[in-house]
Image (tube, helix red, strand yellow):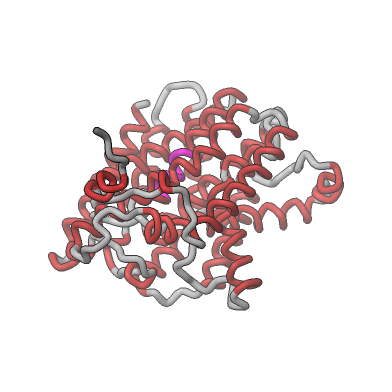
Amino acid sequence: MTYIFLAMIVSFGVTLAAIRLQRPSAHAHAARSESSSESKMHGLNRAGGIGVAAGLLISLLARLFAEAPYAIASAHMGLTLLVAVLPIFAAGLLEDFTQRIGIWARLLAALASALLAGWMLGAWIPRFDFAPLDAVIAFPLVSALLTCVLVAGVTHAFNIIDGFNGLAGGVAALILLGIAYVAFKAGDIAVLAAALTAVGAIAGFMLLNFPRGLIYLGDGGAYLLGFWIGVLLVMLIARNPDVSAWFPVLLCSYPVCELLFSIYRRVVIRRAHPGLPDVAHLHHLIYMRLVRWLVGSSLPEPKSQRNALTAPYLWIVTSIGVVPSVVFWQSPLALQIGCLLFAATYVYCYVRIAKFRAPRWWVLRKPHERRSSAPETR
């Protein structure tokens, strides 16, 4: 527990220092708007990922000097993960500060990081708990290729959902808690420690990110969390035969669905490049069509309030995948059914919101709007 608090304190301190170093005018941009162009801000206000990385690094280094059983082994694993994440983390930071790193360069960096993690930690997917695919993945080269692609996919999925205060950080924390629980049940102390340390680092960042948005995770931070989660899930499956290979799929069902549906929407529907940014993600629709609080005002403070009200919607969505995944982490059939149900629910909700047909109880309104819509009583 000490190392979790250490990660939180270091992460908080570094992100606070980044805020202090910002130009005074930068605070005027604390509330993001509906357009993705305004969320792509330059400078230290997108350096929250540096704080998370610093929290992880200091906590893991301190653990090297601990006398507790498994402390050194878990520290070595975490530090190796930090080395492996360097290509994609660096690419994300360069994009944060320069806006000149293309999507393909970042994809190659994610693949390189996944390859490094697999080579240094033996983090290769060993099975899919699905007979036709298990026969194919038995070949080492196929296993390595699929692992790199899947880890890179999860890494980019977290960058896609990083659009509002507390969104990516909150989703990542919920998923990491799910990993920690199953690692505890499986007796995998190293994965448990790495997951909880990351939760501590995220907590330190979230104190300054949610709800006011004093600093943002940035591409570097989103890639760091996505990669950390992706590799921990691969290691959990590889090191623990009792954990179903479908556990990561349902656990990460929200970011995975967001990634796959975004590719489908861009390539099939819009006939556009799959990496082309847009404002049609589920979190954008929730912000624009469900969060009606102070809609009529364009002042920074009302915008910040609407921004902060968006993330809890997606925390609930994430929990719909996390809760059953940690309950049925040993049952492939139950996890597969859960994945199908979540995907169907995601598409249903997306279509309802996109067509302005969401149930009224989904919509957050102004207080006077709620009063006017309530039935009169005598």
- Quarter of the image with the C terminus in it: top left
- Quarter of the image with the N terminus in it: top left
Q: Residue furthest front?
A: 378
Residue segment shown in magenta: 168-175
**Residue 193 spot, x, y in % from top left:** 48, 32
| Residue 35 visible in the current orientation | yes
| Residue 22 visible in the current orientation | no
Which residue: 47% across, 44% down? 79
Is 282 covered by the magenta stretch? no
**Residue 32 spot, x, y in % from top left:** 30, 63
**Residue 65 spot, x, y in % from top left:** 39, 30
Secondary structure mostly taken by the magenta-highlighted segment of the chain: helix
Front-most of residues 314 and 196? 314
> Is residue 17 found left or right of 375 in the rendered image?
left
> Is residue 15 found left or right of 186 in the rendered image?
left
Q: Measured along the vertical axis of the image, is residue 336 above or below residue 90?
A: above
> Is residue 111 found left or right of 294 in the rendered image?
right
Q: Measured along the vertical axis of the image, is residue 344 above or below residue 279?
A: above
**Residue 105 spot, x, y in % from top left:** 54, 72
Which residue: 65% across, 51% down? 119
Which residue: 30% across, 70% down? 42
Number of numbered discs visible in the structure rendering: 0
Is 173 covered by the magenta stretch? yes
Which residue: 56% across, 72% down? 104
Q: What is the quadrant of residue 93 in the picture?
A: bottom left
> Is residue 372 found left or right of 314 in the rendered image?
left
Front-most of residues 238 and 74? 238
